[in-house]
Image (cartoon, coloured by chain):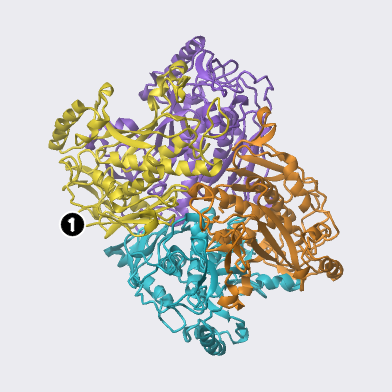
Chain colours: A cyan, B orange, C yellow, D purple
Amino acid sequence: MSHNTYGHLFRVTTWGESHGPALGCVVDGCPPGLRLDAADIQHWLDRRKPGTSRFVTQRREPDEVRILSGVFADERTGGQVTTGTPISLMIENVDQRSRDYSDIARSFRPGHADYAYFAKYGVRDYRGGGRSSARETAARVAAGAVARKVLGEGVRIRAALVQVGPHGIDRSAWDWAETENNAFWSPDAKAAALWESYLDEVRKDLSSVGAVVEVHAEGVPAGWGAPLYAKLDAELAGALMSINAAKGVEIGEGFASATLTGQENADEMRMGAEGVRFTSNHAGGILGGISTGQTVIARVAFKPTSSIPTPRLSLNEAGEEIEVRTTGRHDPCVAIRAAPVVEAMTACVLADAFLRHRAQTGGGAFVPGQTGRR
Amino acid sequence: MSHNTYGHLFRVTTWGESHGPALGCVVDGCPPGLRLDAADIQHWLDRRKPGTSRFVTQRREPDEVRILSGVFADERTGGQVTTGTPISLMIENVDQRSRDYSDIARSFRPGHADYAYFAKYGVRDYRGGGRSSARETAARVAAGAVARKVLGEGVRIRAALVQVGPHGIDRSAWDWAETENNAFWSPDAKAAALWESYLDEVRKDLSSVGAVVEVHAEGVPAGWGAPLYAKLDAELAGALMSINAAKGVEIGEGFASATLTGQENADEMRMGAEGVRFTSNHAGGILGGISTGQTVIARVAFKPTSSIPTPRLSLNEAGEEIEVRTTGRHDPCVAIRAAPVVEAMTACVLADAFLRHRAQTGGGAFVPGQTGRR
Amino acid sequence: MSHNTYGHLFRVTTWGESHGPALGCVVDGCPPGLRLDAADIQHWLDRRKPGTSRFVTQRREPDEVRILSGVFADERTGGQVTTGTPISLMIENVDQRSRDYSDIARSFRPGHADYAYFAKYGVRDYRGGGRSSARETAARVAAGAVARKVLGEGVRIRAALVQVGPHGIDRSAWDWAETENNAFWSPDAKAAALWESYLDEVRKDLSSVGAVVEVHAEGVPAGWGAPLYAKLDAELAGALMSINAAKGVEIGEGFASATLTGQENADEMRMGAEGVRFTSNHAGGILGGISTGQTVIARVAFKPTSSIPTPRLSLNEAGEEIEVRTTGRHDPCVAIRAAPVVEAMTACVLADAFLRHRAQTGGGAFVPGQTGRR
Amino acid sequence: MSHNTYGHLFRVTTWGESHGPALGCVVDGCPPGLRLDAADIQHWLDRRKPGTSRFVTQRREPDEVRILSGVFADERTGGQVTTGTPISLMIENVDQRSRDYSDIARSFRPGHADYAYFAKYGVRDYRGGGRSSARETAARVAAGAVARKVLGEGVRIRAALVQVGPHGIDRSAWDWAETENNAFWSPDAKAAALWESYLDEVRKDLSSVGAVVEVHAEGVPAGWGAPLYAKLDAELAGALMSINAAKGVEIGEGFASATLTGQENADEMRMGAEGVRFTSNHAGGILGGISTGQTVIARVAFKPTSSIPTPRLSLNEAGEEIEVRTTGRHDPCVAIRAAPVVEAMTACVLADAFLRHRAQTGGGAFVPGQTGRR
């Protein structure tokens, strides 16, 4: 996590502004010999693509990714594979409407990065938020697609919205299949229906609202994560908090664990047919910064979209007091499109942890009652 | 954040196990010429010292820090100062009661790192939790003392407990001075009284409970933080989540921001007598990953102490199903002693962000209505 | 220096293969507000461009660089400037002659990276050497152009060839202006004339030859470099040795210093009109890993071009013993085109050292007889 | 290589000054389960210990190392092993003669780091050179001992002096066993005899002289090293150049390769009984930044000891022109004691490369004529 690079060994460097000619990333440190075509990446990009429902930005971007390096179609391997060299991915910005930005060029939109970038850099690309635009997350999703290849089929990463504004899902109704059937990645069909009417209301009120995304990584073996400052949960927290509009991250029970007793919180252990079996997962699959073999579970809170059509008091670069009101295409709930990004960042964190675990230990984990690594 | 090193430029590498001969850290990258004596560090260590009240571990450790390198008493500077070379800090373990560990040596205590360390490493120092013991946080607090020197008097970092089990404070009663008057770092005297009787009850029940710590960093100037993957909030999240028993981190409104509307969440801006003035601080002092000049605010959720005298089901290294019950000295609420650690990690994050900001920009920030950096 | 990223704060990540669609780099951590146009970069790229004389590869590449991010044309600044966000630079490969590679696809060319890449990765882009091609150095030169902007006009970095095969220059005839007048970056016109006939001979012999490049960085202030493992000379050594075909690096007297006595080697100091004055520069401007204010001087030895038309014994991937002979366009002395690359890497090292020095100290240096930093 | 930390995965952070209470290092990222006792480290420290012959400093230091963390004596493993947590090593400074330093406290000794540290930091521990003292290399040797454990018995790293002043060895007389028989690590007995009388002469002349150390790492498998900026040769160059007094590094033929033709330089390949066989090793075991399976060979040039009893012109901190003359115990040829340090740094570089190779590829290498990794 240096500047615009994420990761230690599986390293992702993203670049690009909302209204520049293109954006992209360089994925470095990827193991060689993994099958990788543009279509593998496009699949995940299409899931976060703008314009897929009336609840997300209507910007029209095909978001077509090109692989510029790091792969090779070798007849022996029967398809295009990674070569172990940097994988450069590029997505051209097509719909950079060259509209007149003079009204917002010198203004600070409340809740946005405008003022902070001005204070730090003095100069900023104000068109569409420039570098601080959520458009950058396309590069994360592309990198996440490569990370999934590193993790392989055994690790399954899925995110869902579990709360929109004040409306949470009914967790007993959780159905992963349902997340593909509604516009909100909701695992609860009823919640999705509620959110639909709720968000229509929010938009009519010229407002926006926040939400909470939950991600599950199934199949993560025990042993990933490197205490103490590269703990798996610490790295997840950092990576997920780096997503635009994120304001909170929790693992397992998270903030609710403050109210638990020691008895309640202890995930008890038994031997099952396939090895260690926990009777509960309050820990979210991580103890002491190391994965336990249970499903890794995290939640991310997103603030409401800052771009709203309702005027807010603010300043401009000249120090004048002004009103700011955002017009144009904007998501009423930015977190909806964040779900694929949460998945992607989780994939990057895990791929990086996997490689470091393999480096230090050779891979595998010790199993109670057995000798040596499995 | 690599292995056991925290930070990019202000780098802290900690080492040591609970029952080894000593623990400590190397603080590298510290600016030269800062006044630094052992007493400066001891002041903060004494605040997290075990045995200060009946609600924290009764282990008897003087926790006396020695500075082994990186400082020099130069007559011209009129006192001991940092030299810019690595500052090695060491704390000897005095009370490593060499009791018989054979009962827990091969067992996995639920909620602890035991099983995870076993799975990853195969071998582990099981005495007192070894490397995963909260004792390591003494090294963090020592490093945090150096970080405060880097930040100088202008930045003030204070933490408070705002919730113990289900009992939150009355925020309207917030009084920082009060945190020095009770055993719980509570800014609300009434809450402290309630927690006292509540925790006595918890202990009688052979149980433990979680809590939430809130930290405020006042005086952080605008411009610190480096998007996108070294965002100030992302780095705070990672650093705070790396503390033992942490399960959640939030910035500003955090998870509550999911329920806010865009209008509510927008921190509006006005020009005040001393420059930019925000009318609220839902953002917790960070926008787009960069500090805004407002107070930086974060909260950390801690799970209940995992060491409890009530038996829990578990396994041992042989794969046998057993019961585990922790006897001996243990905090009923581990978060109480975490408050100074939260402060220390926040100080380290900010010192590191300060140095990187100065590197890229030369320091200072642009102010609306003025030219050049201030 | 991780994988394909160079630098700590001024970070350059390069990507691309010789015969892929494009190559490029992401320059991250650049200070904001620096004037930067594509033409500023193109100037340096044109100096290393293939096809400029009969002594360098005849591949026809325009090597036109595009800036895809990280700059913004802001009317107030009166030109395009860096914004502090990642600068993505791309150069399309135009002349990737899609010739038949079947003859070398499975063969290991002696002296090349072929076998090493095969052993490590199993799969490799064999077209034109793939990632190991000297073509990658175009990205380094592009990054170096940005680094020069960071360093400003005060630091001047120039490289020259001082030896080709067994033929060294006459150092007493050194004239920097001359390096622009011949095809060899020779500061000695007579040496250049000799090399011309010598290299024609080498080529007629279906052979190639090595050379030594010397780089001078004038105007580097005292104080840059961070002991002990980020010493300025250690970082220069690493960066310069990372250039294709480099086999040796020395600073100041370098290997000759082994034969000097302590008296000879001591660069004595006097006070001059403009501060500290050294009476000699055996150290090459670096003591204890920190710049002294003298000209920083390094030399890099390059091996002969490995691609030669004379057959050599080798193996193929099937383990069969074969003969390999390289046909087609190739430099008889790869070091000629390395001179701009040596300059570029030196610029990157210095820009990175400058930023880190500013981070830790605020910038400037102490001067004997004066108080405070200058 | 950040500040005082070497390495990416196998990370060594050193600390300590020449005349402080102690010095040491933290070795982080070490694989778990390796046998490691203090005696394993002491063995290597004893080889660089001061006072072993009249040609090295007469400072009396027992250099006894203590392991403060990261190991555990577990009955199952039958001995003390690494646990995968940070290994803290400490060596107390015993012979920090508290002599009067007032004569040199404000002076800059030519060829030393004095002036550079003053310019950068303003304040410095001038006693015995402080942080810039060669005494720091004890920590490197200690870390190197751990690195050798990581590499295992299969990799053998040995260094020898091959030149002292103008006197080189007779390479045809190379005998590794001889390096243990003389005070100079000379593989050539006759050269050792010559150096002995030569250095006596040098000392009588109140002078000092430089030397060249050569290191061989046998048994390094093919595939280690990570292009492009973490090439094995680039990392070796950086690590070796970071050693005190180093002024040049070369790999394989090094600077001599500039004079070779392409035919001469090509290490031809044949299939041998045990796989790939090279008919020569001009490359020094590294091609394209990746090991080839041949012996890795590097040479390091060291300048003459800067501390000489002959007066030299210099300045003091007040800017006054003075004469400096070093009295007391000093090596006439600092490179003699550098040989174990060169070995240690080579071990650290290789251990780090090994772990990264295992991370990205799972370990092993492809072999011509066979499928899959071996």
Q: Which residue is mark 1?
A: C97
Tag 1's secondary structure?
Answer: loop
Residue nearer the viewer, D275 or D188? D188
Vertical arrangement, residue D62 with respect to residue D68, above or below: above
Vertical arrangement, residue B109 with respect to residue D21, above or below: below
> Dot 1: within a 10 Å radius of its alpha carbon, few (fewer than 14), some, or many (20 or more) residues?
few
Residue found farthest to the left: C204
Which residue: 64% across, 21% down?
D101
The N terminus of chain B lies in which quarter of the figure?
bottom right
Vertical arrangement, residue C170 with respect to residue D36, above or below: above
Tell me the chain of label 1: C
- Can you give x and y, in whole percent of width and height, for residue B296 in the image? 63, 60
Q: Quadrant of residue C168?
A: top left
- Can you give x and y, in whole percent of width and height, for residue D285 in the image? 37, 40
Number of residue marks: 1
Judged left or right of residue D59, residue C42 is: left
Residue nearer the viewer, C225 or A220? C225
Tell me which amino acid carries mark 1: Arg
Q: Quadrant of residue D62?
A: top right
Judged left or right of residue A10, residue B295 is: right
Residue nearer the viewer, C254 or B37? B37
Q: Is residue C9 visible?
A: yes
Which residue: 34% across, 75% down?
A62
- Can you give x and y, in whole percent of width and height, for residue B122 in the image? 62, 57
Residue nearer the viewer, D122 or B301? D122
Judged left or right of residue A114, residue D26 is: right
